[in-house]
Amino acid sequence: MLIYNVTTHVEPSIEQEWLLWMKEEHLPKMVQTGCFLKAKLFKVITDQDQEGISYATQYHCNSRKEYEDYIALHAKALRQDTIERFGNAILAFRTQLEEITTLA
């Protein structure tokens, strides 16, 4: 399993608007690409004052090919949507995680 992780730093003034947009628009669009099995949104909890709030969004896919298909076919348009809507009020950092093992 591969997880595409996007950590986003959000300015407090747009946090509620961004959260609503993520839940109602962006996450469903990401899953509807067919490249991801599911999406999970987490709030990053920290004691450090970062003048904003951070969230981690994890998009789960079965293979690197599904992730590469997302990048090739969908990423540019979906990222542009985000930029047009929120501009510099958010800052995203993207990583890929490869699952090694799971213990229950």
Image (cartoon, grey):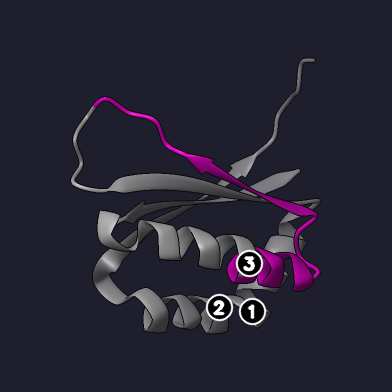
Residue indicated by mark 1: 74
Q: Which residue is mark 2?
A: 78
Q: Is residue 39 left or right of residue 41?
A: right
Residue type (three-letter) at the residue carrying disc 2:
Leu
Query: Mark 2–mark 1 contact, CB under 8 Å?
Result: yes
- Percent x, y of residue 55: 44, 46
In terms of secondary structure, where does tag 2 sit? helix
Q: Which mark is residue 24?
A: 3
- The 10 Å Cα crowd at callout 1, few under 14, some 14 to 19, many 20 or more, is some
Q: In the figure, 44 relative to 85: above or below? A: above
Q: Position of residue 16 (x, y in %)?
A: 42, 58
Q: Residue at position x 28%, y 54% from top?
A: 12
Q: CA distance from mark 2 to mark 1?
A: 6 Å
Q: Label 3 is placed on what type of residue?
A: Glu
Q: Nearer the viewer, mark 2 or mark 1?
A: 2
Q: Residue at 26% of width from left, 25% of height from top?
A: 47
Left or right: 23 in relation to 32: left
Nearest-to-viewer mark from 3 and 2: 3
* Residue 39 within the segment the image draws in magenta: yes
**As drawn, 93 above or below 76:** above
**Residue 16: in magenta span:** no
Query: In the displayed structure, would residue 77 be above or below residue 27?
Result: below
Judged from this view, the residue extending furthest toward the top is 104
Point 79% across, 15% down: residue:
104
- State how many labels appear: 3
Q: Residue at x 39, y 84 (%)?
A: 84
Dots 3, 2 in contact, CB < 8 A: no
Marks 3 and 1 sit apart, C-alpha to C-alpha, by 18 Å
Answer with mark 3 or mark 1, whichever residue precedes in sequence. 3
Q: Position of residue 72 (x, y in %)?
A: 63, 78
Q: Is residue 29 visible?
A: yes
Q: What residue span does the magenta drawing correspond to?
A: 25-47
